[in-house]
Amino acid sequence: MAASAEIFFPASRLAVDECMISYTGRFKETTVVTGKPIPLGFKI
């Protein structure tokens, strides 16, 4: 972690990519996004 802190300097223009992880079990926090390749799962 210390080595990556020396290399990476975040600027004011930082993009965050979101993705879905497929999950079909029972859990309250699952998300449904219709029209996507993975419509049900965890959005991170």
Image (tube, grey):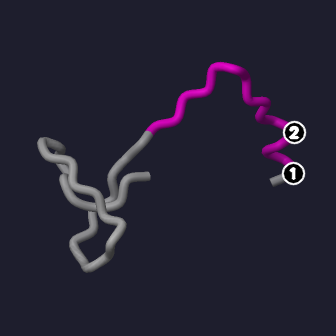
Residue 12: x percent and y percent?
A: 70, 20
Q: Amino acid at mark 1?
A: Ala
Residue 16 included in the magenta stretch of the image: yes
Residue linked to disc 1: 2
Left or right of residue 8, residue 31 in this image: left
SS under mark 2: helix
Q: Most extreme residue toward the top, as rendered?
A: 13
Kindly check if marks 2 and 1 are in contact, taking CB atoms under 8 A apart as contact: yes
Q: Which residues are magenta?
A: 2-17
Q: Residue at x 79, y 45 (%)?
A: 4
Closer to the camera in the image, 1 or 17: 17
Residue 15 included in the magenta stretch of the image: yes
Mark 1: give few (<14), some (14-19) or many (20+) Cα within 10 Å. Answer: few
SS under mark 1: helix
Dominant SS in magenta:
loop
Residue linked to disc 2: 6
Q: Amino acid at mark 2?
A: Glu
Residue 35: x percent and y percent?
A: 12, 42
Q: Residue at x 54, y 28 (%)?
A: 15
Q: Most extreme residue toward the bottom, as rendered?
A: 26
Residue 44: x percent and y percent?
A: 44, 52
Quadrant of the image containing the N terminus: bottom right
- 22 is higher (above) or lower (below) than 13: below
Q: CA distance from mark 2 to mark 1?
A: 6 Å
Residue 41 shows which numbered tag? none
Q: Residue at x 32, y 76 (%)?
A: 27
Mark 2: give few (<14), some (14-19) or many (20+) Cα within 10 Å. Answer: few
- Classify residue 5 by image quadrant: top right
Q: Residue at x 21, y 48 (%)?
A: 33
